[in-house]
Each structure stands twice: as structure tokens, then as C-alpha cells.
Amino acid sequence: MFLYILLLIFGVFCCATSVVFIKLANIEPITLSSFRLLVATVFLLPLFIKEYRVNKEEVTLKDFITPLVPAVMLSLHFISWIAAARMTPAANASLIVNLVPLVMPLLLYIFLKEKINRVEMVATLIALAGVSLLGISDFNVNPEFLKGDILCFISMLFLSLYLVLGRKNTGDLWLYMVPLYFYAFCLCFIIALIFEVPFRAYEIKDILMAIGLGLVPTVIGHTVLNYSMKHLRGQIVSIFTMFQFVFAGVMGYFLFDEVPTVTFCIVSILLTISAVVATTDVIVKKKKR
């Protein structure tokens, strides 16, 4: 169980690196989202083929249909998040996208009949207290940003649904993840063709950043999140995903000279306490069995 927690932390860290690649890549947002998904699909394709050959007698049409809805959720999360981030201040966006633990219990119950326990509730309240502190200090209440704030909330729901549906999947990992990334790529690329210009000459640096975005936060990060949703309780995963905020802040300091505020440090401490509370409960229960 402890190894699953360490793997989850590593996966969340990898997801947090996306902000670095996005900042360094001079590629339009939706096009960049489609490129990262294409890189993930191509890179993982050999694993998909290998797993398919081993299990081809058991593979059915349902195995290829199952990833379709989660892929749509992932695509809509990427696209709506990009649009929302441009319509509202960064503080508003950071607060709202970190509300996943608030809605996750309801979604887990609706889709899986899974209820969170008391310790997970306490850990969630501690984490949300940190997010609320961030909101109180920086949130900008302005009608001008209302549409962006609402879109951020919708984007957060897409992310939550994508994770819950990943937990619902009971098939082999690569037979699920590779079609998911491919379907999500197709949808993002079609939308990019409508709103952006994906076919143009790119600098080597931008291509490398797109590849990095596909390999680190997507191949490793999102794959680990889906794997963790199958092996850990859903609310535990949702609490740990909030650490993207902390990791991104630390990387921003070292890479872009973005000095963390006192509020950032306090919120980071509260999120750490929340994770320790949730993790300790899981490990103790595991030892008792």
C-alpha cells in the first residue's frame, strides 16, 4: 500500500510539470493538448499491442468502447481549462480547479456506490481549508470573471468524472489508457482545426516541449492517476491531486523565479497534513488486515 502512495505522489508531481512545458512551448493551447495526447498514444502503442496479443481471445468490442466517455471528459477538461484560465485570474482558477475533493465523494457514490469514511472526511476538510485560505487571500469577486469561474468549475467536474470513470474501469491498463489517449487526441485535434492553426512550422524547442508534455505529465502522470484510482480509494487520490498546486509552486520558484507567498506556504502545510492524515489511516487499516 505504501508503494502505491509513493507512486501516486510521483504521478502527481509529473502532472504538475505540465505548467513548465506549457509555459516554455510556443504552441497554441488546444493544438498543444492534442500533441501531448498524440505523443502519449504513440509512445504507449507498443505496450497496447503487446497486451492485446496476450489477451486477444478475451478482448471484446466493449474494451474499446469503455475508454470513449472518459476520453471525452479528458478532452473537455483540457479544452475548458485552457479557455477558463484565459477568462479569469490565476488565483480564481487555482482555487476552483482544486475543488476536486469536494465533488469526488458525490461522484464516487453515484457511479460506484463508494462512501468516504470519517478520516477521509477530516483529511478533505483540512485540504479544503487550505484551498479556502488561498481563495480568501487572492480570489477576485468580479462579475467580469463570472463566466471564467463557472467554466473553471465545469472543467473541474470534467476532471473529476474522468478520474471516477478510470476507477470504474476493470480491464487491463494499457488496453484502457492507449485508446483513451487516442480518442482524446482525435477530439482535441478536430477542435484545434476549427479554432487554431495546428499545421505550421514549429521550432525544435517547441517540439521538444510538446514531446516532454506528452511523456511526463501525460504518459507518466495521468497514467499513474488512473492506475491509482484502481488500487487506492478515490477520495485519497483526489486529495493527493491537490499537491499539483504545491509542486507547481516549487518548480515556479526554481525555474521562473516566482517567489512563493506566505499564503502558499500555509496552504502547502495544510495539504501536507491532510495527506498525512489520509495516508496514515490507509496504512493502519492495511496492517490490521
Image (tube, helix red, strand yellow):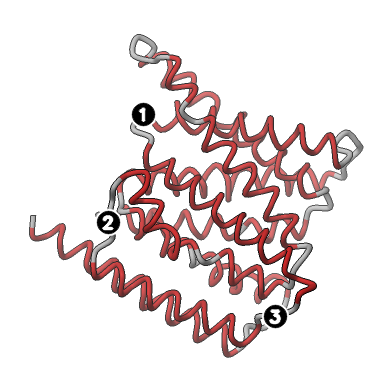
Q: Residue at x 52, y 80 (%)?
A: 132
Left or right side of 112 for 192: right
Q: Residue at x 78, y 42 (%)?
A: 31
Position of residue 65 relative to residue 272, above or below, is above
> How far across and down, in percent of the image, does residue 21 sit?
70, 55
Instruction: Measure the alpha-carbon separation of dots 3 and 1.
Output: 44 Å
- Give the CA separation, mark 2 to mark 3: 33 Å
Residue tagged 3 = 141
Instruction: Kindly state the secondary structure of the residue where label 1 is placed.
Output: loop
What number is the disc on residue 115? Answer: 2
What amino acid is at disc 3?
Answer: Val
| Mark in the foreground, 1 or 2 | 2
> In terms of depth relative to the viewer, which is nearer, 233 or 8?
233
Outermost residue toward the left?
288
Q: CA distance from mark 1 to mark 2?
A: 23 Å
Q: Residue furthest bottom?
A: 262
Mark toward the start of the polypeptide (3 vs 1)? 3
Q: Residue at x 42, y 46 (%)?
A: 164
Image coordinates for residue 22, horizontal then vertical, percent: 73, 56
- Element at label 2: loop
Q: Residue at x 37, y 47 (%)?
A: 110
